[in-house]
Image (spheres, coloured by chain):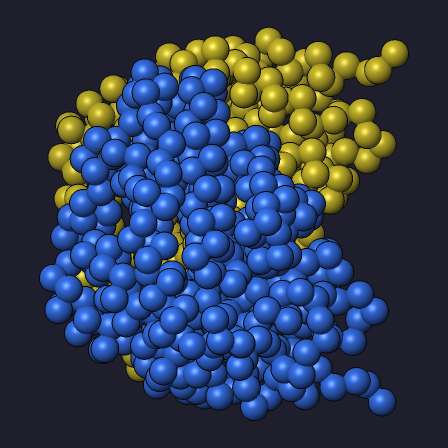
Chain colours: A blue, B yellow
Amino acid sequence: MANLKNDLYLRTLRGEKVERTPIWVMRQAGRYLPEYRATRKRAGDFLTLCKTPELACEVTLQPIDRFGLDAAILFSDILTIPDAMGLGLVLEEGVGPVFERPLRSAAEIAALGVPDAEQDLGYVMDAVRVIRAELDGRVPLIGFSGSPWTLASYMVEGRGSKEFHLVKGLMFEDSRAMHQLLQKVTEAVIDYLIAQAAAGAQSLMVFDTWGGMLSTANYQAFSLQYMSQIVAALKSHEHSSDVPLVLFTKGGGQWLEAMADTGCDGLGLDWTVDLASAKQRVGDRVVLQGNMDPVVMNTGPDQVRDQALSVLAAYDHHGEHDKGHVFNLGHGIQPHAKPDNMQVLVETIKSHSGSFHLPND
Amino acid sequence: MANLKNDLYLRTLRGEKVERTPIWVMRQAGRYLPEYRATRKRAGDFLTLCKTPELACEVTLQPIDRFGLDAAILFSDILTIPDAMGLGLVLEEGVGPVFERPLRSAAEIAALGVPDAEQDLGYVMDAVRVIRAELDGRVPLIGFSGSPWTLASYMVEGRGSKEFHLVKGLMFEDSRAMHQLLQKVTEAVIDYLIAQAAAGAQSLMVFDTWGGMLSTANYQAFSLQYMSQIVAALKSHEHSSDVPLVLFTKGGGQWLEAMADTGCDGLGLDWTVDLASAKQRVGDRVVLQGNMDPVVMNTGPDQVRDQALSVLAAYDHHGEHDKGHVFNLGHGIQPHAKPDNMQVLVETIKSHSGSFHLPND
């Protein structure tokens, strides 16, 4: 494989002193981009786009080609693992992802098998390999998975939810079955992420989209505990031990200390978290990634510049023990976002972040 | 007016040592109750129910009669103020509350008048008076309002939203117009809450349902600043200075210290917040109210008992400086909840909370 020409993102995640702040954006390959919409139209539907390595590669590279971001992220769906477990993922127009066979009983959970990543999710590993070849060392590739709690929530609810009363009902009424489900999903996620690393992913991220719906005690027991298992397993496996790992719980701003305790390399912060306070709380232990409000990207270039500079200014690089900062939004960029704003954002970070890294006089 | 027979809730909010933990439940008069559904059917529609004092009184008292809760809360809609400001509130089946004339320009905001509570929202004050008479001193009556940010969000979006891109767009692109809107709504809320107190509300609460969608800096500037104005105005007005005031920001667990700084009497906590930690952070300055996950009420009686006891145990009444705890859910009780579970919950709090208040040996 080609040597990396731009390894800023990886050096930052390793806690090295760097010359400027790296930037990538959650959902950077997405509907706000006309070229993405064109590829998706050509693919016919979203799942075909995810399951065809050449098409997944094409959309993964679009924002890299256009904006010069510092990292690419594998284009895939968060629900590939439950799909491989046999739940039957379909996309319903106007509803989003839906499982044809959601889990509704302890018996169904007990019967569930753990997929083999290379065998049952080979299209994802193929996409990683194709993307790595196509990137040709320009920037590192980030692999990812949904968190066990987030995947299990979809598997029980069968679709997105506002209150999550089915999965929380299972959690409160049959915590044993819930833990059994989470343990199986955790094993699948570990295998999946190690396989991505083996296929060429140079950094990994776990998206805990729904952990923030839990009480603090239940977050620890039903979400964080399983993410901790993932960190421990990845850090002790030859294919993934040197691959920086970032955890992101949307709505998890109250729990950063506990998240840092897992031993991960970085934490993603949603936009509600005060970056300066977060740094004081855990910034000497983990790199922080984030966290501009994604809605700013739907406004004007002046707003994008101002808000991006505020985020940069909030992270003090002159502390004795700072680990580092990766610029990102606090959640995925929205379909309403203006592509020109991404250009402004990337230019702002590239041209202005360096000054925040200079030593004080 | 009759003397209060049960003033446990008020004594707790005043920070007095009490014999047990009081309990009321957000949305306790609501769709989970068959008698509520019957009254609503009789009313024809939701807004008629809100705007007819006798019917609002009827549903306010239903959970008091049935469960023996320690406080009643005025039955009303959160959007009465924008409705009185002329935005035209209607209820669309399957969508929820919708404004016929949402605010989409600085000119529309500049033209907006501030309603007079007694004149333009007289049906609410009439409801307060009718309910006080009907309660006849059994328990205190809580009045309430939406927070300025929450009301303004609805006024700009025109309906509930997931991303709030319209109101946040206004906030980022024309903060002056946004502040003008918030200032007008704040004046309306102050007048509205003072009028409720004058009409007989014995405690007041501000619901900041959407403040948790903001970044920390924007929460301070666009939500909390205006709630602070409300606290200051109410605490200096003869009709409301002695009326305990509780602030509740859903998703505001990161900001409890700043919320306590407003000088309010109590803070509502959503279910994600760890009650024991919250008490350590601010429990010597404000009473804490909450915070069982509402989904527990959709499960079985054993789960309700267990989870309620966990909440009680999390608040240590033996600290040197604790102000006190009011039991509640962390958000409104859901339509799926089982009425029998409310009975179990109230009995659990009434029979078990006393032991947590006994002095240690």
- Residue at point 22%, 42% (across, down): A89
Nearer the observer, A134 or B116:
A134
Considering every residue shown, the one lying at the far front of the view is A1
Above or below, comparing residue B114 to residue A308 in the picture: above
- Residue at point 15%, 29% (across, down): B41
* Residue A276 in the figure: left or right of residue A181: right
Nearer the observer, A24 or A270:
A24
* Residue B220 in the figure: left or right of residue B98: right
* Residue A174 in the figure: left or right of residue B253: left
Q: What x and y, as percent, mark residue A254? A: 61, 48
Q: What x and y, as percent, mark residue A250? A: 49, 52
Above or below, comparing residue A7 to residue B300 in the picture: below
> Which of the 4 quarters of the picture holds residue B93?
top left
- Residue at point 40%, 83% (across, down): A67
- Residue at point 35%, 22% (across, down): A109
Considering every residue shown, the one lying at the far right of the view is B361
